[in-house]
Amino acid sequence: MDITIRRARPEEYGALGDLTARAYLEDGHLDFGAEDRYLPVLRDVAGRAAHAEILVAAADDTTAGGLLGGVTFVPSCGPVADIAREGESEIRMLAVSPGARGRGVGELLVRACVQRSRDAGRDRLVLSSSPSMRTAHRLYERLGFARTPERDWSPVPGLPLLTYALTL
């Protein structure tokens, strides 16, 4: 199956929001399950798209399942950025459909963000990740991201987030 990385289309926002929320829920990355306050944020692709670039991984053969994953690429600090500073881009809400795991979808999405960050002339690409997202951490480290523990933070009490950066 061939995979294409492209901008999400507005008519796909609902499906991508559901895919993202489902991936976080099924992998146990939300402390309060279906009642977690972060679920509406994960589903609000249209809200993110107003301030960031939404990328999807799509199967070229639409009979193979359509959307395989997605990511929010934040080109610079601004309303959708969590930790990006001047000269930095940010990756947010990377999600791969459980049925598409192990096919390189996450890596393709991250590499697309790296290229967009370079094309934008940024110095670094940064991201935050839950400690439970160990598979993602291995991917980031394999692609050259380094932990930046001095930038770790908590959006709410009791929810620590680890940070990573790739110098471009």
Image (cartoon, grey):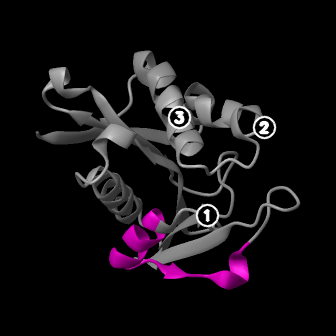
- 146 in magenta: yes
Mark with earlier residue (3, 2) = 3
SS label for mark 2 = loop
The answer to whether mark 2 and mark 1 are in CB contact below 8 A is no
Residue 7: numbered disc: none
Mark 1: which amino acid?
Answer: Ser
Residue 20 on image: x %, y %: 51, 37
Residue for point 55% across, 81% down: 147
SS label for mark 1 = strand
In the picture, the quarter occupied by the N terminus is top left
Mark with earlier residue (2, 1) = 2
Task: Place residue 139 in its image quadrant.
Answer: bottom left
Q: Residues within 10 Å of mark 3 (few under 14, many from 20)?
A: many
Q: Is residue 109 visible?
A: yes
Residue for point 80% across, 57% down: 155
How far apart, in angstroms, are the residues tagged by discs 2 and 1? 18 Å
Residue 10 on image: x %, y %: 44, 20
SS label for mark 3 = helix
Give the prevailing secondary structure in the magenta stretch.
Answer: helix
Q: Which residue is mark 1?
A: 128
How far apart, in angstroms, are the residues tagged by discs 3 and 2? 14 Å
Residue 37 on image: x %, y %: 78, 37
Q: Residues within 10 Å of mark 2 (few under 14, many from 20)?
A: few
Q: What is the count of numbered marks?
A: 3
Point out the stretch of residues depicted in magenta.
135-152
Q: Which residue is mark 3?
A: 22
Q: Nearer the viewer, residue 117 or 48?
A: 48
Q: Which residue is mark 2?
A: 37
Task: Place residue 167 in its image quadrant.
Answer: bottom left
Mark 2: which amino acid?
Answer: Arg
Residue 109 on image: x %, y %: 34, 52
